[in-house]
Amino acid sequence: MQELSLDWLKNNAYPGRGIIMGLAPGGERVQIYWIMGRSENSKNRIFVQNKDGSVSTKAFDEKKLTDPSLIIYTPLRVVNEAHIISNGNQTDTIAEFLQSGKTAEEALKTRTFEPDAPNYTPRISGIFYPNGSYALSIIKANGKENPKRESLFIEKEAGTAGFGEMLTTYEGDFDPLPSFKGLPRRMPIKSTAQENLNFYWDMLNPKYRVSILVSFNGEIIMRNGNL
């Protein structure tokens, strides 16, 4: 069994944005997503829940917003009872494909890493399907010079109660930022939404953490560092 990666996350000054997908000890479906930031523009964000149940990022101070292109998006949507979570507007691409009868994997094949040279931030995504299976995906650059698209799409027929898998955008706080390496890292899932939110918020570097949300069997709670 894969070892837990708690120390890796706790000691990582800047893992960037992160997704954890898995099952609580009671079998509840859990999705966790957080955002972090180093620049003033990236830190100037909060999560807001929309009337349709989706969650979007929003500028905390609209006057300080300089470039919304990669920081304002909808990380969480529910379409056809599939719960989609991602670190960018690929959430919308997945939703559109599912609504038209296609698959999340087909949707992600139309996307690539973020155009933020020299970092080329990976796109990370997760989908819980109505039957309880789930998938995780990362799309990243295969280098910093003349980069080409490299992707991984993993499906799990069933999760393991009390555990989940984590993808983050980065490996640490360097320049340029190194993309996540290897397979999704195994992480614990706690018994309640609030426990998960508190546990993972406390794991993140206070200097860079911005917001976190937890979807627990579809019920959503959030914490915004700016509020």
Image (cartoon, rainbow, N blue to C red):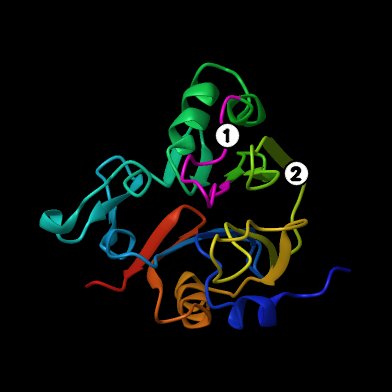
The residue positioned farthest toward the front in the image shown: 145
Q: Mark 2: which secondary structure?
A: strand
Q: Give whichever of 16, 178 is nearer the camera.
A: 178
The residue positioned farthest toward the top in the image shown: 100
Q: Residue at x 24, y 72 (%)?
A: 226
Magenta-drawn segment: 110-123
Residue 82 x/y as whole percent: 54, 38
Please identify the quadrant where the C terminus is shown.
Answer: bottom left
Residue 181 x/y as whole percent: 72, 58
Which dot marks residue 154? Answer: 2
Residue 137 visible, this angle:
yes
155 left or right, relative to 52: right
The residue positioned farthest toward the left in the image shown: 63
- Asked where in the image residue 10 lies, by quadrant, the reply is bottom right
- Asked where in the image residue 209 lies, by quadrant, the reply is bottom left
Which dot marks residue 37? Answer: none
Q: Is residue 64 magenta?
A: no
Q: CA distance from mark 1 to mark 2?
A: 17 Å
- Tell me the amino acid under the disc marked 2: Ile
Q: Residue at x 60, y 39 (%)?
A: 130
203 left or right, relative to 11: left
Residue 212 x/y as whole percent: 41, 66
**For residue 56, above or below residue 181:** above
Q: How many marks?
A: 2
**For residue 41, above or below residue 55:** below
Residue 162 visible, this angle:
no
Q: Residue at x 46, y 73 (%)?
A: 197
**For residue 85, above or below residue 176:** above
First reached walking from the N terminus: tag 1 or tag 2: 1
Write down the residue under mark 1: 112
Q: Residue at x 15, y 60 (%)?
A: 61
